[in-house]
Image (spheres, rainbow, N blue to C red):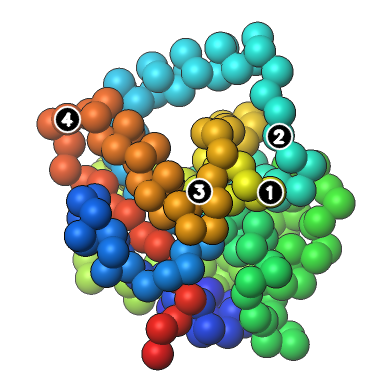
């Protein structure tokens, strides 16, 4: 697993969420500290994103200064950005190896702006190289160059009792209201359902939870 290559100890593990009804959600090991959503970037989504951005620029969102947010400036790095968002906002829960490149990256960029973090990631060989090798391993067939990669990863995290959507393609974190450690998975899934409802013809949605290893 990519995060283990980056020095995150396997006390917490990423696992698929197989369905959104309460029975299937109850099978996900708890506690859950982050949720990743992989979804198709469609015209409907792009139009919504533009609209949301305009609306939120007009009304100031309250975003906790403790939210770690990084912009995405590297093409096809949304998986890496999603992982950084999931991990950087949960350092209190997670364990790292002493020489973890991921921990080092998060510590070195902790006081930077989201743009400065993006620039720092562009130059950080240790994280980029690991991502590229894991992307190759995880792909049975590399997509041909003319195939447009239009799937995107975003993260949901709980920071100070608020649910945030973190998407490196957006200018800022998006607040989705109150949450708690107990209700976090359900609350994040409610937002994922809105993404799905926006594109009812689409089936390419995957939800992944970062859970405490039950074994």
- Position of 165 relative to 98 (above/below): above
Bin the neighbour count of mark 2 within 10 Å (Cα to Cα): few under 14, some 14-19, many 20 and up: some
Residue 158 image point, x, y percent = 58, 51
- Residue name at image x 65 percent, y 9 percent: 58
Q: Secondary structure at mark 1?
A: loop
Q: CA distance from mark 4 to mark 1?
A: 33 Å
As helix, strand or loop, the secondary structure at mark 4 comes to: loop
x, y percentage for residue 25?
28, 59
Residue behind mark 1: 160
Q: Residue 121 in the image: x percent, y percent? A: 69, 56
Residue at the image point whose x is 17% and y is 36% from the top: 202
Q: Are marks 3 and 2 in contact (CB under 8 Å)?
A: no
**Residue 150: which quarter of the image?**
top left
Residue under pointer 2: 63
Around disc 4, counting alpha carbons within 10 Å, would you say few (fewer than 14), some (14 to 19), or many (20 or more)?
Answer: few
Left or right of residue 142: residue 69: right
> Which disc number belongs to residue 200?
4
Q: Which label's residue is closer to the chain start, 3 or 4? A: 3
Where does the N terminus fall, quadrant-wise?
Answer: bottom left
Q: Where is residue 179 drawn, in percent x and y?
A: 54, 45
Can you tell which of label 1 and label 2 is closer to the viewer?
Answer: 1
Quadrant for the C terminus in the image: bottom left
Identified at 40% across, 62% down, the residue is 209
**Mark 3 or mark 2: which comes first in sequence?**
2
Question: Marks 3 and 4, how far apart in space?
Answer: 21 Å
User: Extreme right residue here?
Assistant: 111
User: Can you tell which mark lies on residue 156?
Assistant: 3
Q: Earlier in the sequence, mark 2 or mark 4?
A: 2
Real-space CA distance between mark 1 and mark 2, rounded to the nearest whole angstrom? 10 Å
At x 81%, y 56%, the residue is: 110
Which numbered disc flags the more N-terminal residue, 4 or 1? 1
């Amino acid at each position: 697993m990519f995060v283990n290559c980056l020095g995150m100890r396997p006390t917490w593990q990423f696992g698929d969420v197989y369905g959104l009804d309460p029975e299937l959600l109850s099978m996900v090991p708890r506690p859950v500290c982050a949720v990743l959503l992989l979804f198709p970037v469609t015209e409907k989504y792009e139009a919504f994103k533009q609209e949301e951005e305009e609306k939120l620029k007009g009304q100031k969102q309250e975003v906790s200064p403790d939210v770690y947010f990084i912009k995405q400036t590297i093409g096809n790095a949304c998986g890496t950005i999603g992982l950084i968002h999931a991990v950087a906002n949960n350092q209190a829960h997670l364990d790292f190896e002493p020489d973890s490149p991921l921990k080092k990256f998060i510590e070195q960029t902790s006081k930077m702006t989201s743009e400065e973090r993006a620039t720092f990631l562009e130059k950080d060989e240790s994280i980029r190289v690991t991502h590229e090798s894991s992307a190759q391993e995880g792909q049975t067939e590399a997509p041909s160059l003319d195939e447009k990669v239009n799937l995107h990863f975003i993260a949901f995290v709980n920071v100070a009792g608020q649910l945030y959507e973190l998407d490196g393609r957006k200018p800022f974190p998006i607040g989705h209201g109150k949450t708690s450690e107990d209700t976090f998975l359900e609350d994040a899934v409610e937002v994922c359902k809105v993404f799905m409802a926006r594109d009812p013809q689409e089936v390419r949605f995957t939800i992944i939870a970062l859970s405490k290893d039950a074994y």
